[in-house]
Image: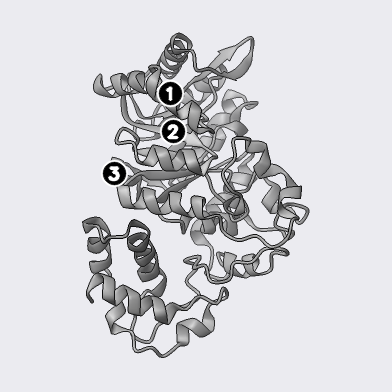
Amino acid sequence: MKYRELGRTKLKVSEIALGCEGFQDKSQSETNALLSYAIENGVNFMDMYSPNPTLHLHIAEAIRNHPDFLIQAHLCTIWRNGQYQVTRNLKEVIKGFEDYFTHFGVSYFPIGMIHYVDNLPLWEKIKKEGILAYAKECKKKGKIGHIGISSHNPEVALAASECEDIDVIMFSVNPCYDLMPATENVDDLFDLSKYQNGFLNLDPKREAVYEECARRGVGIDVMKAYGGGELLRASGPAGVALTPTECIAYALDRPAVAAIMVGAHSLEEIKDALAYEKASEQERDYARALKSFPRISWKGKCMYCGHCAPCPKGISVADVTKFLNLAKAEGETRETVQSHYDALPHHAGECIQCGACNSRCPFAVDAMKNMLEAKEIFGK
């Protein structure tokens, strides 16, 4: 298992992590078996959006002997009449979050995630009407380490990334959702007809989320990497069936992404996700799948897939391009981006303009031009 820093939190999280939805109907023994297998294989991170008290008790028991296992708890979810509900009523938010501590028998969670913020007016309400203030109070008191929000809307995610109080964003990331513009209706992301209206390309606002988070040190953990399972079926929006490994590889290649919260309902589904860690380059090669998508064009967009390698001078063309795009999006070269570029073993200035990278790119990116721009911007 590989571990990544979750942005400026400095938390070391397993790049394959778990969502909680698949555990909802499991017994204690089933929960123990699934989590034991995941933990034995290096998983140390789990999202817990559900306020289900039985689920909490089962998970708490299963990780009792693993104090370093990280739980991402959610504010604004409550359990009422045997059902999960979202609330923005501050009293209910406080009571619901306190229930998390009671159920898990802990006094601290590393992340407190403000749940399901999918439009800008709601984000403003959360900032102005006490919910963000309550999260900050929890952090000040040492009850949570970092504040995050979950959102499917790139406009909200961008706004949150600019808020100094937000360290983590849980965002929906996959190669089909990345085509969809900002919307207040999350169901639009699942509407197959949205993908039938002529050629689509990467939505610039979603691309900007990754770049802005990377620049500001805001960590991203990923939900909906499989699109609720739709991307794993040929009948889904892609028009071709992707594999779990391809979906995970795509999401992990986006700037600022640290972990994929895999929705797993069975041991086989956990194994399918963990298979990514031992997968070959060919098995991780989502670029071939993206190129075959009907009605969708990725021309001219670097997907950081690495097909440009190998470079005869040893340059990691994909990494150089990633840092170049971060600098260009900002309009200036921040020290953090410069330092990451400087740490590369080989730099754009070593490029001999042989054209090997251009000839290999599935998306017709002019990598040679990017190397010239990177040399000019980064100075070497």
Tell how many labels. Answer: 3
* Left or right placement of residue 378 versus residue 90 in this view: left
Q: Residue 149 carries which label?
A: 2
Please tell me which residue lies in front, 284 or 134. Answer: 134
Asked whether the beta carbons under mark 2 and mark 1 sit within 8 Å of each other, the answer is yes
Q: Earlier in the sequence, mark 2 or mark 1?
A: 1
Q: In which quarter of the image is residue 298?
A: bottom right
Relative image position of residue 318 (x, y in whole percent): 42, 70
What is the three-letter code of the residue carrying label 1?
Ile
User: How many angstroms separate mark 3 from mark 2 (CA)?
Assistant: 15 Å
Asked whether the beta carbons under mark 1 and mark 3 sit within 8 Å of each other, the answer is no
Mark 2: few/some/many CA within 10 Å (<14, 14-19, 20+): many
The secondary element bearing badge 1 is classed as helix
Mark 1: few/some/many CA within 10 Å (<14, 14-19, 20+): some
Q: Which of marks 2 and 1 is in front?
A: 1
Q: Quadrant of residue 45?
A: top left
Asked whether the beta carbons under mark 3 and mark 2 sit within 8 Å of each other, the answer is no
What is the three-letter code of the residue carrying label 3?
Arg
Q: Can residue 62 be seen in this view?
A: no
Q: Residue 126 carries which label?
A: 1
Q: Nearer the viewer, mark 1 or mark 3?
A: 1
Q: Earlier in the sequence, mark 3 or mark 2?
A: 3
Q: Residue beneath label 3, please?
A: 8
The secondary element bearing badge 2 is classed as strand
Query: Which colouring convention does the figure follow?
Result: one colour
User: How many angstroms separate mark 2 from mark 1 (CA)?
Assistant: 11 Å
Please tell me which residue lies in front, 42 or 291. Answer: 291
Relative image position of residue 266 (x, y in whole percent): 64, 39
* Left or right placement of residue 199 versus residue 19 in this view: right
